Image (spheres, rainbow, N blue to C red):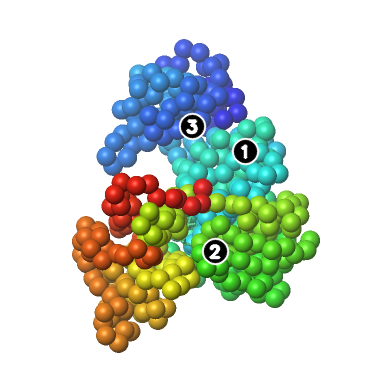
Amino acid sequence: MIALSLAEIASLVGGQPHDIPDTGRLVTGSVVIDSRRVEPDGLFAAFAGAQVDGHDYAERAIASGAAAVLATRPVGVPAIVVPDVTEALGALARAVVARLGTTLVALTGSAGKTSTKDLIAQLLERKAPTVWTPGSLNNEIGLPITALCATEDTRHLVLEMGARGVGHIRYLTGLTPPSIGVVLNVGTAHIGEFGGREQIAEAKGELVESLPADGVAVLNADDPLVRAMATRTKARVLLFGEADDADVRAENVRLTEQGRPTFTLHTPSGCSAVTLRLYGEHHVSNALAAAAVAHELDMSVDEIAVALSEAGNLSRWRMEVTERPDGVTVVNDAYNANPESMRAALRALVAMGKGRRTWAVLGEMAELGDEALAEHDAVGRLAVRLNVSKLVAVGGREASWLQLGAYNEGSWGEESVYVSDTQAAVDLLRGELRPGDVVLVKASRSVGLERVAAALLESTSGAEGQVSGR
Ligand SMILES: Nc1ncnc2c1ncn2[C@@H]1O[C@H](COP(=O)(O)OP(=O)(O)O)[C@@H](O)[C@H]1O
Ligand SMILES: [Mg+2]
């Protein structure tokens, strides 16, 4: 964090110093919410969660070197006491970002935010110091904490913005107002909470509504609900996609034998060939969004193409491909799932598995509301239609719908099997996998299918596999 005294911080967040011997003491370390991660001269923000209350760890945080605790009550050690810690973090981030001359890039969408944010970061980092959201910390707590990592040297701040309802993105853009705003897609993620696709579009579009007239709205030309957001912004619009009128476009898209997308990238400054290190055709759209941002920040098409072709997977469990010593390939995409990403992952599996046996180990896609049955059924059917050798549906009722879809689509019913838990899936796979097989593991976060991927990677005589990507 930029150096600020405790007195300045208290004033910026509207808080009361308590038990602080010297309010002139400077905070220079990061802001953290986990007392085990406290940095010397940092700030510890105490949150009261369902299981643990951060206030109970205040003493430990100070003992580890924190300058003070941001808290909602006095804690017997140096603290700045505020009515609401989330709002205080937001106020601090807003004030710090306003002082810095950093270019703010924000992105949202139903699927691909983290992957695209990681691509944008890897592109912009080549030009100038860049700070970006680690992993998926895209909410009202993670976003200010990330923004507070920016310093006077930071030229680009790349922020993932998530939303579970209308008004959330507006709140986040109020803290860190972007000059470049990217909307990737409007899918069905969290549709149960939002109510419908239109509501999701309403919420995601708040990002472009926040942009200034000299800003840029980077919109997906291939997604009608995103393209329509052009009318909701004062900013200039830059379209990306495969549509003919997209400013940043991919042509001749195909998947290599490894399942990696390769295409010709067109930007207003020319064209250049790209082969991604990431797996799955859905990353073409993500790469184009990243290219559009890089183009706006003055990178040439050749620079962008090289950077995209070298960019790796920065966040875990997203199409993480590991070759086992026995020739089984494990594709761990267990981070999350929705209908769009399930389809993209199945297509990538089939491309990677050409001439090999392919296994799709899939679980529930959460939060689909009324569409849950139809969407699980459709994914099950697609697995059969794409000729995936075997679908293993893991978990509860939703997983059984996946299996039923596959069963109804297949002629013999041998294309799919249902198991009720991850251990049963592991036992089945351990018994049946043969050298050369490719296994995709994917479900919503809550299912915890990464345990299946981990077990498959452990089960090979202790030898280390080769993890590709970064
Ligand atoms: N453009 C896209 N369209 C559909 N699915 C995608 C896209 N990009 C990534 N995915 C898939 O969505 C899941 C979540 O990806 P991630 O990049 O973490 O997105 P988010 O941060 O929006 O949740 C992954 O399983 C990934 O394979
Ligand atoms: Mg994310």
Amino acid at circle 3 = Val
Q: Is residue 199 left or right of 360 when viewed as pictured?
A: right
Give the spatial CA distance, label 3 vs label 2. 38 Å
Give the class, few, some or many, for how many residues have Cα within 10 Å of label 1's Cα (few <14, many ≥20).
many
- Residue 317 percent across, percent down from the top left: 42, 53
Question: Visible in this render: residue 332?
Answer: no
- Three-letter code, disc 1: Val
Which residue is the site of mark 1?
97
Q: Which of marks 1 and 3 precedes in the sequence?
A: 3
Determine which of the numbered discs, if any, sits on residue 260 in the image: 2
Q: Secondary structure at mark 3?
A: strand
- Give the distance between the C-alpha atoms of the residues marked 1 and 2, in whole angstroms: 37 Å
How crowded pointer 3 is (Cα within 10 Å; few <14, some 14-19, many 20+) is rated as many
Q: Amino acid at mark 2?
A: Arg
Some atom of ligand 1 lies within 8 Å of the CB belonging to the residue at label 2: no
Check residue 31 in the rendering and tell me which mark sits there, or answer none.
Answer: 3
Residue at image position (42%, 54%) is 322
User: Camera-side residue: 28 or 452?
Assistant: 452
Say which residue appears at 35% left-offset and 57% top-offset.
Answer: 326
Mark toward the viewer: 1 or 2: 2
Instruction: Determine the secondary structure under disc 2.
Output: loop
Are the residues flagged by discs 3 and 2 in contact, CB closer than 8 Å?
Answer: no
Tell me the quarter of the image containing the N terminus: top right
Q: Position of residue 441 (x, y in %)?
A: 36, 61
The answer to which of marks 1 and 2 sits earlier in the sequence is 1
Which x, y percent locates residue 155? 68, 40
As displayed, is residue 1 above or below residue 432?
Answer: above
Residue 92 drawn at (x, y percent): 55, 34
